[in-house]
């Protein structure tokens, strides 16, 4: 493995990296996937996946519904002024824990390409070749690097990416619970300074995952205090936190979540998934976008690979152009909706309007989602 020159090294084995490694290796590309954590593992995520990626996943031999994913067709949203609106989701989706979903993809990837579990420390591009160095100083060589390292990683620091120096105001918390909750529904309940998603997973557990600002959170002593005295002002969350039985000893948390714009290609590295851009989680579409961006890169790469003469400049420009066409607007719309929802006045006006014209909700959802791929 050491002296080999891979066609492609994929850094990061989340949904984007795993999908890309699977797609390329299934077509005969020599791929190495480098992931820092072994599988399976839990991740902070709402765990609602839009159906837009189902046909593509099926084409790769992945069938989440056959694996027990919960079909979801309804959305309920509420704010702390006690209003709840229900709508049918235009495309719908499914609920599956990241513990199961990522591992499902990993098992397939492990059959078709090389995988190592190490933290990548450096990616250097010299004379049309990359050297990818792991924390144990092992060097891996390749012609192309796809980095799928997620929202925030040591790699962003190493590459000196613009967003990494800017302060981020968001943190997120997730836990699974036993709770009587409709399986066909994903709920989004807002509270002062954030919002919380609830939906069922393949185990029957309800995943509760929330995003909040540091300024809202810091007024409270700890997570339980925040849930009881801030989030529970929303009666739906109050009922949930009073009745639900936690299934994890302690919650999973992440901080410094940045929604700043990023670039899909940097230092000749193709960024896919959250490393290229993160949509606000209230859209419930980050995983679908991560998977879609893997498809986008893989198809462009394979098209050029067939010609036996890959033009790096053209590939980079085309990927950048198509990534922006597919995802930039959605990310901007997500940012806009988040701002409206987090402001007490605009949220109140918005909820009143949606109560009168619930069909508007579908129009908003469509703005942040794509067509099935
Ligand atoms: C609070 C919250 C709730 C969300 N809810 C939803 C939802 O309900 N629905 C939805 O569709 N999306 C949701 N999202 C978004 C979704 O989680 C992401 O868009 C998705 O996980 C992106 O996948 P990815 O593969 O790009 O990144 P990740 O899944 O984060 O994978 C990145 C991988 O890279 C690895 N890695 C990082 N650095 C290195 C390194 N140096 N060396 C080796 N490996 C490395 C990590 O270990 C990780 O496995 C949510 C996000 C947040 C923050």
Image (cartoon, rainbow, N blue to C red):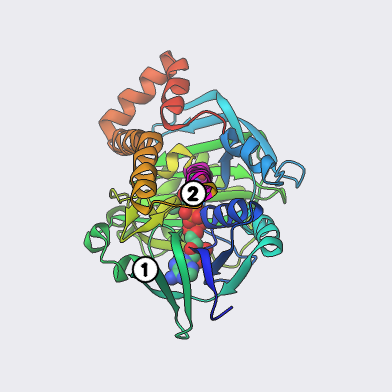
From the top left corner, tell me how far across and down residue 106 is, in percent: 65, 60
Q: Which residues are magenta?
A: 286-305
Residue 210 visible in the snapshot: yes
The kind of secondary structure element at disc 2 is helix
Mark 1 C-beta closer than 8 Å to ligand 1: yes
Q: Which residue is tagged 1?
A: 155
Residue of label 2: 301
13 shown above or below 363: below
Instruction: Specify the quadrant that holds the C terminus.
Output: top right
The one of 184 and 238 positioned closer to us in this rendering? 184
Can you give x and y, in whole percent of width and height, for residue 96 in the image?
A: 65, 48
Residue 346 quadrant? top left
Dot in front, 2 or 1: 2
Q: Is 306 contained in the magenta span?
A: no
The residues bearing labels 2 and 1 have C-alpha atoms spaced at a distance of 23 Å
Q: Residue at x 57, y 42 (%)?
A: 48
Tell me which label, 2 or 1, sits earlier in the chain: 1
Residue at x-position 56% and y-position 71%: 37
Callout 2: 10 Å neighbours few (<14), some, many (20+)? many
The reply to whether dot 2 and dot 1 touch (C-beta < 8 Å) is no
Q: Which mark is residue 324?
A: none
- The verdict on residue 289 being magenta is yes
Q: Is residue 44 among the parts visible in the rendering?
A: no
Distance from mark 2 CB to nearest ligand 1 atom below 8 Å:
no
Residue at image position (30%, 33%) is 340
Camera-nearest residue between 252 and 35 = 35
Vertical comparison of 72 with 266: above or below: above
Q: Residue furthest bottom?
A: 136
* Residue neighbourhood size for the residue with mark 1, other residues' Cα within 10 Å, grouped as few (<14), some (14–19), many (≥20): some
């Amino acid at each position: 493995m050491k002296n080999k020159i891979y066609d492609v090294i994929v850094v990061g084995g989340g949904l984007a990296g795993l999908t890309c490694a699977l797609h390329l290796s299934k077509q005969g590309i020599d791929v190495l996937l480098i992931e820092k954590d072994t599988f399976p593992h839990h991740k902070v995520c709402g765990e609602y996946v839009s159906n837009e990626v189902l046909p593509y996943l099926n084409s790769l031999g992945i069938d989440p519904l056959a694996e027990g994913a919960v079909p979801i067709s309804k959305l309920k949203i509420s704010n702390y002024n006690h209003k709840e609106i229900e709508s049918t989701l235009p495309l719908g989706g499914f609920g599956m824990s990241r513990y199961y979903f990522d591992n499902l993809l990993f098992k397939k990837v492990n059959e078709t390409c090389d995988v190592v579990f190490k933290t990548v420390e450096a990616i250097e591009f010299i004379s049309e070749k990359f050297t990818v160095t792991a924390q144990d100083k092992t060097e891996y060589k390749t012609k192309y690097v796809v980095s799928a390292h997620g929202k925030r990683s040591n790699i962003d620091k190493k590459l000196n990416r613009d967003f990494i120096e800017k302060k981020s105001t968001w943190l997120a918390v997730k836990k699974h619970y036993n709770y009587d909750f409709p399986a066909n529904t994903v709920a989004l309940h807002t509270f002062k300074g954030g919002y919380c998603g609830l939906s069922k997973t393949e185990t029957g557990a309800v995943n509760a995952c929330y995003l909040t600002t540091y300024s809202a959170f810091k007024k409270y002593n700890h997570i339980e205090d925040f849930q009881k005295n801030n989030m529970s002002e929303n009666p739906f969350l109050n009922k949930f936190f009073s009745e639900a039985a936690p299934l994890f000893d302690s919650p999973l948390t992440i901080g410094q979540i940045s929604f700043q714009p990023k670039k899909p290609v940097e230092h000749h590295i193709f960024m896919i998934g959250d490393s290229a851009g993160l949509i606000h989680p209230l859209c419930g579409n980050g995983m679908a976008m991560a998977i879609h961006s893997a498809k986008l890169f893989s198809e462009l790469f394979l098209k050029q690979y067939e010609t036996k003469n890959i033009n790096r400049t053209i590939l980079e420009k085309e990927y950048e152009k198509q990534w922006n066409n597919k995802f930039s607007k959605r990310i901007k719309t997500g940012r806009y909706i988040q701002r409206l929802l987090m402001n007490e006045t605009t949220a109140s006006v918005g909820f009143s309007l949606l109560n009168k014209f619930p069909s508007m909700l579908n129009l908003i959802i469509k703005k942040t989602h794509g067509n099935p791929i």
